[in-house]
Image: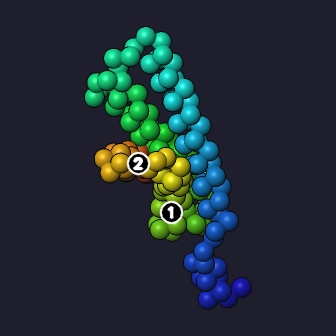
């Protein structure tokens, strides 16, 4: 194999190497979101109705679990992403961020009758903070 064809092989898109990180990232995020939603429902139903009426309660029951779910899903996607595609910065970033963005996009599209502007902005903040935490965890793991 010549140097030119080897170089072309390493820089060509490796779509199949992105499927495993995307699939496991999406699965992790969805499972964690469902688990935390069930836990939150049990807490609210179990006699803590004032939690959902305060800002701290809403952050604790809705936004913190969403951020942690996105962070863990992003970290898992980075953990299963393999070289040589992992060594390419943009491909690795795509492997990390696409699962969380796909889950959030699905949530936006499935919301009826449509999310409000403030709801979209808060969800995007949850997404950004979770992905940033997951990216940081992945960077720490790669050292």
Residue at image location 28% in from the left, 24% down from the top: 54
Tag 1 secondary structure = helix
Q: Assess disc 2: are there few (<14), some (14-19) or many (≥20) residues with their C-alpha within 10 Å of its C-alpha.
A: some
Extreme residue toward the top, this view:
47
Determine the image quadrant of residue 2.
Answer: bottom right
Answer with left or right where residue 8 lies relative to residue 115. right
Asked if residue 36 is positioned above or below residue 137 in the image, the reply reads: above
In percent of width and height, residue 17 lies at 65, 63
In percent of width and height, residue 99 lies at 54, 53
Q: Mark 2 points at which residue?
A: 115
Residue at image location 51% in from the left, 54% down from the top: 109
Extreme residue toward the front, this view:
113
Extreme residue toward the right, this view:
1
Residue at image location 33% in from the left, 17% down from the top: 50
Residue at image location 61% in from the left, 59% down from the top: 82
Asked if residue 82 is positioned above or below residue 38 in the image, the reply reads: below
Residue 140 in view (yes/no): no
Asked if residue 37 is positioned above or below residue 9 in the image, the reply reads: above
Q: Assess disc 1: are there few (<14), some (14-19) or many (≥20) residues with their C-alpha within 10 Å of its C-alpha.
A: some
Residue 97 in view (yes/no): yes
Quadrant location, the N terminus: bottom right
Alpha carbon distance from label 1 to label 2: 26 Å
* Depth order, front residue of 64/46: 46
Q: Are marks 1 and 2 in contact (CB under 8 Å)?
A: no
Q: Mark 1 points at which residue?
A: 94
């Amino acid at each position: 194999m010549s140097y030119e064809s080897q170089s072309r092989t390493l820089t060509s898109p490796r779509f199949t190497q992105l499927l495993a990180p995307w699939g496991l990232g999406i699965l992790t995020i969805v499972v964690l979101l469902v688990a935390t939603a069930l836990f939150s429902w049990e807490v609210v139903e179990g006699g803590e109705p004032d939690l959902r009426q305060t800002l701290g309660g809403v952050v604790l029951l809705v936004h913190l679990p969403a951020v942690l779910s996105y962070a863990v899903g992003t970290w898992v996607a980075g953990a299963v992403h393999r070289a040589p595609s992992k060594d390419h910065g943009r491909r690795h970033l795509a492997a990390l961020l696409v699962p969380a963005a796909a889950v959030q996009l699905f949530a936006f599209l499935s919301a009826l009758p449509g999310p409000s502007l403030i709801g979209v902005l808060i969800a995007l903040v949850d997404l950004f903070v979770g992905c940033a935490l997951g990216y940081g965890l992945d960077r720490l793991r790669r050292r």
